[in-house]
Amino acid sequence: MNTVAIDTAPAEPRKFLCLEEAHPHNGTLLGFWLYLMSDCFIFASLFACNAVLGTSYAGGPTGHDVFDLPGLAVNTALLLISSVTFGFAMLEMARQRKRAVLVWLAVSGLLAAAFVGLEIHEFVTMIAAGAGPDRSAFLSSFFALVGTHGLHVSVGILWLIVLMFQLGKHGFTEANRRRLFCLSMFWHFLDLVWIGVFSYVYLVGVLR
Amino acid sequence: MSHPSPSVHDHGTSHDAGHDTMHAGHGSLRSYLTGFVLAAVLTIIPFWLVMGHVIASPQTTILIVLGLAAVQIVVHMIYFLHLDTKSENGWNMLAFMFTLVLVVIVLGASVWVMYNENANMMPMSPQYIHHKQGA
């Protein structure tokens, strides 16, 4: 029916100022940094929740009743040391020493696993004592924030294990180096978020 | 990772090739250890303040704890995440500053608005009555 032919060819060749967009040299690392910044925003929202709801106890337990500060100190130390040992792994990678990298990664992973284990133990103890996330708005916001952080650490451990296998099998390929840099940023970032958690949620939560 | 087009090399202005492909995350043993010592000190002080009941006023303690946390976040940024104005030609820092502005708005505005809500609109909540009776 339609017999009108549309001439799609441009009248003259198009001119572009540049043939393609300039790519940043470390596209993946910058992109991963942007992801971390958006993750930062998720945590900021959860922190805002905790700030607003942190004193809505609904007649239930307060932070002073449920928080175990010596246990928190152990957890904080585990995560901080894990961050530093991951840094050591990155230094060994710069020196191309695969075995040392794997050892430091394993140490970091075990420390983080101990952190998650202690956190799960804390959660189970709290829930058994009737201070679960359904008890009050304060506890809901607490479990949401600390649980989200713990979930991030758990996923980080999974990522670490996968990367250790990749590294053991393929060595320091370009892809593996890039992945390790990303995981390194992720690892340090989670330690950074934990500063906010232990300072604001726990220490300030005990006081207010 | 490295783009096959020749234009890639045009904007690698400051670094030597092979080194700049993985700029982020570079540190030294000294920077990690410095960061660790600073972070440990900045962690121990707030724990000591809260667990030892060093300062009588909770408000003062809260302010100090939050201030130390802010300092420790900066320490982590510099010594562990190696954030500086040069990494990724400054894009990392720019993205960070943008996030910081948004985070401050979200946190500050939430707390501000909800504090006023609590103060002005819920005088009969059970907590309030409980608080009044306790006072």
Image (tube, helix red, strand yellow):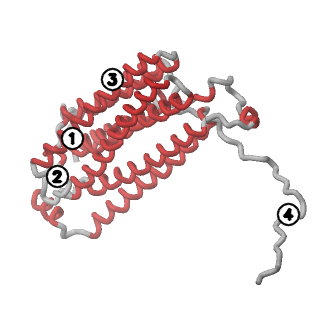
Q: Which residue is mark 3?
A: A107
Q: Label 4 neighbourhood size at 10 Å, few (<14), some (14-19), many (20+)?
A: few
Q: Which residue is mark 4?
A: A10
Residue at image location 14% in from the left, 49% down from the top: A127
Q: Secondary structure at mark 2?
A: loop
Of A28 and B26, which appears nearest the observer? A28
Q: Is residue B76 left or right of residue A126?
A: right
Q: Label 1 neighbourhood size at 10 Å, few (<14), some (14-19), many (20+)?
A: some
Q: Is residue A109 above or below residue A125?
A: above
Q: Which residue is mark 1?
A: A120
The disc numbered 4 marks a residue on which chain?
Answer: A
The disc numbered 1 marks a residue on which chain?
Answer: A
Q: Which residue is mark 2?
A: A132
Q: CA distance from mark 3 to mark 2?
A: 32 Å
Q: CA distance from mark 1 to mark 2?
A: 12 Å
The reply to the same-chain question for discs 3 and 1 is yes
